[in-house]
Image (cartoon, rainbow, N blue to C red):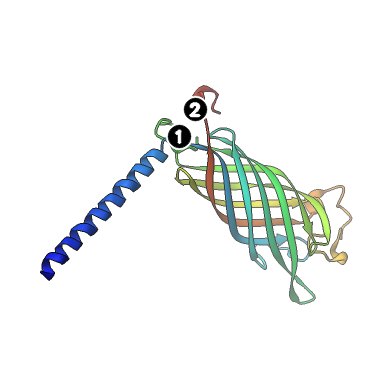
Amino acid sequence: MKGCVGLRLVCCLRKCVLLALVSMCSVLAYGTGHSYRCELGVMGGLAYYTGDANPHIFQHISASYGGYFRYKFTPRWALRAKAQYASLGYGWNDEVQRSRLGQLDVIGEYNFFRLRVNGTDRSARSYSPYVLLGVGAALHGDLQHFGAYLPFGVGFKWQMAPRVSLNVEWQHELFFCDNVEGIEELDNTVGLNKSNFLRNDLVSTLTVGIGFHFLREKPICRRCDW
């Protein structure tokens, strides 16, 4: 009697697992036929500052995190708005100090490959390296000063599923000022803030982000899809 009950239970579990697998395959098969226009995601990683108090790269690395919204015009071109926060570390008076930094930027992205996941575009790929360039503004110097910066960098995108993607990015922010750390004695030490902006402070971030895609896009002409 007990053996019959156990056999029935095993058969029932097999049917449930099979039904779940069939349902999952159906959902995935349906999802791969569509691409999405918008993406909302979160990101986190490492940040470091290069300037008068930190003359070397990868010195006094700190945590950085934020969120982003990306709008895809074509499989190659996208526009992204990003908000990010970090507590930058630097050496001053023989000790490591911290300065809070809040950033907001708008960035244009160009994918080297046609990035799209669906069953109709055979020339598209589920991954692509990309370059980025934009404009941004920040509260720096422990959130006491306002300044603009020029963001640029490189990254890699992987469309893991029709609605989920993974991004790895190394971005640099070249500020139009020399007081990101917020120390007055280090602001414009050589008097070149206005004549040579390459002497200004630089903030770099290495982040990993995961995004959720929404707003299904309409079919478009491939000849105009660049």
Q: Label 1, secondary structure: give it.
A: loop
Judging depth in this view, the residue of 126 and 221 nearest the camera is 221
**Residue at image mark 2:** 219
Mark 2 residue type:
Pro
Quarter in which the C terminus is drawn:
top right
Mark 1 residue type:
Ala
Judging depth in this view, the residue of 131 and 26 nearest the camera is 26
Q: Would you identify the image quadrant in which residue 203 lies? A: bottom right
Q: Residues within 10 Å of mark 2 (few under 14, many from 20)?
A: few
Q: Is residue 108 left or right of residue 220?
A: right
Q: Which mark identifies residue 111? A: none
Q: Nearer the viewer, mark 1 or mark 2?
A: 2
Q: Label 2, secondary structure: give it.
A: loop
Percent across and percent down for residue 146 are 82, 55
Residue 57, visible in the rendered structure: no
Q: Are marks 1 and 2 in contact (CB under 8 Å)?
A: no
Percent across and percent down for residue 172 are 67, 52
Q: Residue at x 31, y 51 (%)?
A: 20
Quarter in which the N terminus is drawn:
bottom left
Number of marks present in the image shown: 2
Compare marks 1 and 2 and give the one earlier in the sequence: 1
Percent across and percent down for residue 181 are 78, 64
Q: Is residue 47 left or right of residue 16?
A: right
**Residue at image mark 1:** 124
